[in-house]
Image (cartoon, rainbow, N blue to C red):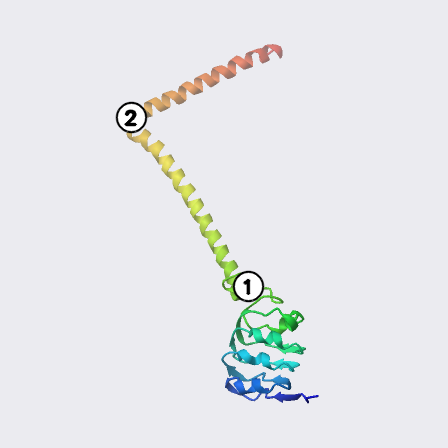
Amino acid sequence: MPVHSTVDLSSNDLSGKIPEKLTELIHLGALNLSWNKLTGNIPNNIGSLTDLESLDLSHNHLLGPIPQSMASMTFLSYLNLSYNNLSGQIPVANQFGTFNDPSIYVGNPELCGGPLPSNCSSPFPGNVEHEDAADEDGDETKKFWLYASIAIGYITGFWFVCGSLVLNRSWRHAYFNFVFDMRDKLLVLIAVNLAPARRRLGL
């Protein structure tokens, strides 16, 4: 039975990419590269470390997607990828289905999928808050133009009617004659309908 060794290079101010040669240590049991200044992608063939039980790559500057080959690391029981610049969808197969703690992936704003709240169907999964803000701004803009169009329509209609009356003397006379006629008819109608009531009340 192979002896599982441990490589712990955490907090050593290491920089550059993760060496591809590390992925050839097929009987490695634990790898800790946290709290360094590592850059570049996680090696695509990291999944060849099939005996790995613990992997900590947190607090670096790693970018790109989580390699799908990591789903082959079926002995992996501890994983920490927090505080990098990883992006894309979190794998869901094998051991990844058991990693339900969001803190494993926190600090990677462009990662999406469970257990994170960001949905991978969004074109920019790391910017959900920005999308919501943009939607709110769009709604406010639509409301502004709605109210503006109502105000413009009201002002236009008002001045169309009033302007016509001011500029056209015959229209103005016809309008006021119509108003006065309607007033007289209304007064007559009120008087006619009030007369029976007055008689019934003995007034």
Q: Quadrant of residue 198?
A: top right
Residue lying farthest to the right in this orientation: 1
Q: Is 125 situated above or below 185?
A: below
Residue density around tag 1, few if under 14, some if 14–19, many if 20 or more, within 10 Å: some
Q: Give me the residue at 36% from left, 24% from top.
A: 175
Is 74 placed above or below 31 here?
A: above
Under mark 1, the amino acid is: Cys
Q: Mark 2: which secondary structure?
A: helix
User: Residue 4 vs residue 108: left or right?
Assistant: right
Residue type highlighted by circle 2: Arg
* Mark 2 burial class by Cα count in 10 Å: few <14, some 14-19, many 20+: few
Left or right? Give the position of 6 relative to 173.
right
Mark 1 vs mark 2: which is more N-terminal? 1
Residue 112 found in image quarter: bottom right
- The quadrant of the rendering that contains the N terminus is bottom right
Tell me residue 45's x, y (percent). Answer: 55, 80
